[in-house]
Image: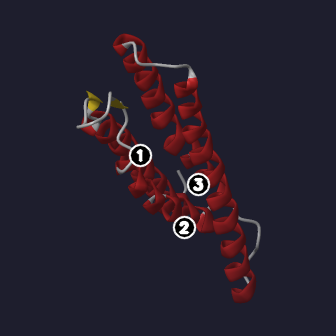
């Protein structure tokens, strides 16, 4: 691997590893089926509060894309796939608990959203990187 691709690759690997960790933690912290006072039940098979930290990973992709959009684009599935797998686990948990009503499949929109925002981050980082290279008089096609 070329030395100029090492830094963006490390950023992408860091973002992907953190995404896996967040998905695992979100599954682990979920409370399952609980019965709050005065209510019938509450189901939580995926702790969505944990996923707010996912917003911290998009700048890593953008920064990697400023060096190399091709390497950074590998981070898009690296961010989204762990959450797709986590949604599979959530669907299994709903099926096993008997609390599913069919709408839980909308949870698959979350990993799709992660992929779209990740792709936008790569695009934005690539454009910023090209602008900086243009200002410095360097070749503008990011590889």
Residue toward you, 130 or 95: 95
Marks 2 and 3 sit apart, C-alpha to C-alpha, by: 8 Å
Residue toward you, 39 or 49: 39
Ranked by sequence position, the earlier of labels 1 and 2 is: 1
Q: Which mark is residue 72?
A: 3
Vertical arrangement, residue 49 with respect to residue 93, above or below: below
Q: Which residue is mark 2?
A: 63
Give me the residue at 25% from left, 39% from top. Answer: 29
Q: Secondary structure at mark 2?
A: helix
Give me the residue at 64% from left, 67% from top. Answer: 125
Image coloring type = secondary structure
Residue toward you, 8 or 44: 44
For the residues labelled 1 and 3, say whether their Cβ atoms are less than 8 Å apart.
no
Q: Mark 1 or mark 3: which is in front? A: 1
Vertical arrangement, residue 53 with respect to residue 105, above or below: below
For the residues labelled 1 and 2, say whether their Cβ atoms are less than 8 Å apart.
no
Mark count: 3
- Left or right placement of residue 9 versus residue 122 in this view: left
Q: Which residue is mark 1?
A: 19
Vertical arrangement, residue 42 with respect to residue 126, above or below: above
Circle 1 packing at 10 Å, graded few (<14), some (14-19), many (20+), is many
- Rendering quarter of residue 137: bottom right
Give me the residue at 66% from left, 48% from top. Answer: 116
Marks 1 and 2 sit apart, C-alpha to C-alpha, by: 16 Å
């Amino acid at each position: 691997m070329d030395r100029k691709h090492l830094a963006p690759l490390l950023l992408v690997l860091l973002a992907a590893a953190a995404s896996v960790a967040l998905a695992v933690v979100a599954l682990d912290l979920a409370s399952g089926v609980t019965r709050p006072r005065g209510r019938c039940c509450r189901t939580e098979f995926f702790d969505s509060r944990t996923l707010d930290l996912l917003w911290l990973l998009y700048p890593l992709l953008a920064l990697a894309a400023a060096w190399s959009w091709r390497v950074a684009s590998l981070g898009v599935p690296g961010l989204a796939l762990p959450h797709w797998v986590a949604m599979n686990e959530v669907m299994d948990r709903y099926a096993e608990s008997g609390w599913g009503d069919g709408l839980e499949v909308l949870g698959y929109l979350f990993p799709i959203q992660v992929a779209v925002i990740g792709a936008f981050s790569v695009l934005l980082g690539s454009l910023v990187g090209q602008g900086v290279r243009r200002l410095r008089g360097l070749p503008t096609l990011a590889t």
